[in-house]
Every structure is written in structure tokens, then in C-alpha cells.
Image: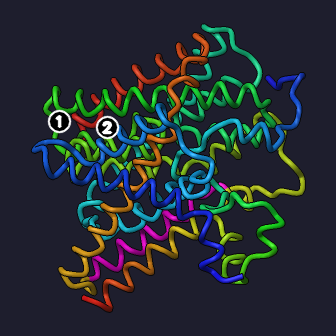
Amino acid sequence: MSIATDARPYVAGVGLLTAGALVAWLMGRAVPGLQPLVVAVVVGAAVGNTVGVPTTAEPGVGVHKLALETGIVLLGAAVAVDELVAAGPTVLGLVVCTVGFGLALSEAVARLWFRLDGVAPSLLAAGASVCGVSAVVAIGRVLDARGATLTVAAATVLLFDAITLVAFPIAGEWLGLSGRTFGVWAGLSMFSTGPVAAAGFAHSPEAGQWATVTKLARNALLGGVAIGYSTLYAARSATDPEARRLWAEFPKFLIGFLLVAAVANAGILSPAALAAIGTAADGLFLVAFVGLGLSIRLRELETVGLAPVGVVLIHLLVVSGLTLAAVRLLL
Amino acid sequence: MADGTRRDATDEDRADVQNDCADARGESGTDRDSGGELSASSPVTRRWRALDRGWQALALGLAVVAGSAVVF
């Protein structure tokens, strides 16, 4: 079998993503002030919740996750390392404190206030504090969570992803935050990486870069959080050493992001090459955000129970309030 | 703290949730085909699909950077 034959099942889905991205790009050019990345999510959600995704297009639509991660790798070329190093210790400190505090807060609110038991509070805490649905799935795997518990936790996170994707850019505009302040705030407070990047870029390119970098730092803690929960629940497998688990949970594309940032900041690439890389990243983000919109199922979000919503809402309000005060004070 | 009624999460259970975050471990970016289709694929495709999605993104990203450096 040739590579062309192997790629055939993906053509329809990739075509759908590309068409959506093209529509978003054209609308962004036609209407001043309209962010193409936000339009891409809206176009995807509109298609996904009306006509739906044809079965033949499903394999190709799944490629949007790869497009998002590749776009983030290329985003490394737009990052000024000296600026990152200057703000690095502060942002890293904020990330570690936010994740630690968020986990403790959600666990306490879920168990003491909403009387949730079992692994559900931990799934909600990990999803809200670290990395959205990926953290729910990863921690669910570590704790052998039931399918129904996983589904409810993931749906709750997705519900808040959809809400914060709209609410954060509006709040950033209303509060008059600078690109860096808004980006770090969104990166610390919102849940899944796609919506964080989309909200950041909806504010400004600078905010998008800071939001993505801050969120990547949070994502990098997933392995440590997984080990912590595994130890806490005493469910650790003797055949799966901690270092191996830590590596398995580590987002590998982060290495690519750092490599590209190092190459770009070493002055090896010409301005034309940097512009071409930036254009490629923009295109990949457009494709990724159409896919993100296609994955939002409004009907599924209606089935989420009140207790998980209450836990995550309290987490979001407290954490976003505290992180807003912190970034305004420290950055 | 542990849930006494817990059971092992099956693949179907895991498929219940949508994983739209950019940092999921292990999963390939193009891994939806069945084992039968995979075995009929070309060696390059098999190797590509065996890669974690994070490695695939890293490889694609570096290829774009290398291509841009050569062309421009």
C-alpha cells in the first residue's frame, strides 16, 4: 500500500477543516475587528451542532489535535526568549501555586461542600487545575475511574471551556488588560489548551503567545500530578516506575516548542523564514480551532449534573479572581 | 478515599469522552484505524502512526522550520 492510499481516509475530514478555516479567514479579512480564530470555533460548532460531521470525515477531523500541537511548536518562533526568561520565574511560580491551590480547593469544595466521593472530585480538580479533558482522562486512567464518572467530569470541563472561550476575551477587554497580563491570566485560569490559545489570540497576538506559553507550563505539571494522585490513592502499579509514568504523561511537543524558540532566537532564520513559519502556525491554528468547534456538542453539555458544575464554577471564580489580582500585581 | 465500587475503565469508557486538549499523552494524531488496516499500511505510515501525537507534532514543526530556512 502507498502513502497516498493510506492518506485517503483522512482527505474528507481534512478538507472539511480546511474549508472551515478558509471561511473563517475570509470572514476575518472582510469584517474589521473580527478575529478569524474565534470565527473558526464558531463555524466548527455551528456545523457540528446542525448538520454534524459525516462518518467519512471523522478520521480526518481528528487531525485537528495534531494541527494544534504543531501550531504550538511553530509558535516557538514568535516567542522572544529574553522576555520569557525575564518573566519566567514569576510565571512559573504562579503556575505551580495556581495548580497546587486549585487542586486543593476543588477537592475540598467537592468533598466537603457538595459531598461528592470516590474519584470524581479528583477528576474535576485535575481537569480544572491542570489541563482540561486531557487531565481528566490521564488521571482517570491512573485512578481506574468508571466510564460514567469520566464522562461527567469531561463534559463539565467542556461546558466551562465553551463558556470561558467567550467570557474571558470580553472580561479582558472590559478590564482593559494588556496583552501579556491577559495572556498569563487566561493561561492560569482557563482549562483546555485549545480554548486558552483561542481566547488569547482573540485578545491580541501577544496575549495569544503568553496564554499558550503559560498554559504549556501548566500542562507540563500533568505527569507530576498523575504521580501524586497515584501515590495518594495507592493505586500505583509496581511494573510502571514513576519516571516512566512521568515521561509518558509529558507533552512531547513542548520539546519542539523549546527547540523552535531556541533556533528562532539564535538568529539563524531570516525575517522571511520567520514570517513563513508564522503564516504556517496561523493556518494550523485556524484548522485546529475549526476542529475544536466541531468537537463541541451542546446536547451533551446539557446532561452535566449540578454538583460537578458547582465545584468547577467555584474553582473558576476563586482561581480566576486570585490569579487576576496576582498578574496585575506581579507583571 | 478510594472508591470501593471502582472497576477498570474500558476502552469504550475512555472513548466516551472527547479529548480536545493539546497535551494528551500517548495518543497518535492519526490513530483511528483498526489493527487490520494498520497491518496493510506502508512501512512509513505504520511508523508514523506508532508515534505519540506529541512526537508527530514535533517532527512536523521542525520540518516546517527546516523547509522555511531552506526556501527563504
**Gap in angstroms between the C-alphas marked 1 and 2:** 10 Å
The quarter of the picture where the C terminus of chain A appears is: top left
Residue at x 52%, y 56% (from the top left corner): A13
Residue contact between numbered discs 1 and 2, judged by CB atoms under 8 Å = yes
Q: What residue is shown at x 54% (from left), y 38% (from top)?
A: A132
Q: Magenta part of the protein: which range?
A: A249-266
Q: Position of residue A81 (x, y in %)?
A: 29, 67
Task: Report the residue marked by disc 1.
Answer: A177
Q: Where is residue A302? Give x, y as percent.
A: 55, 17
Instruction: Tell me the element at label 1.
Output: loop
In the picture, measured across the screen, residue A264 lies left or right of residue A226, that is left
Type of the residue with mark 2? Trp
Q: Quadrant of the N terminus of chain A?
A: bottom right
Residue marked by disc 2: A185
- Quarter of the image holding residue B55? bottom right
Q: Chain of mark 2?
A: A
Residue A280: image location, x then y, percent: 33, 69
Query: Main SS type for the magenta part?
Result: helix
Q: Residue at x 81, y 37 (%)?
A: A144
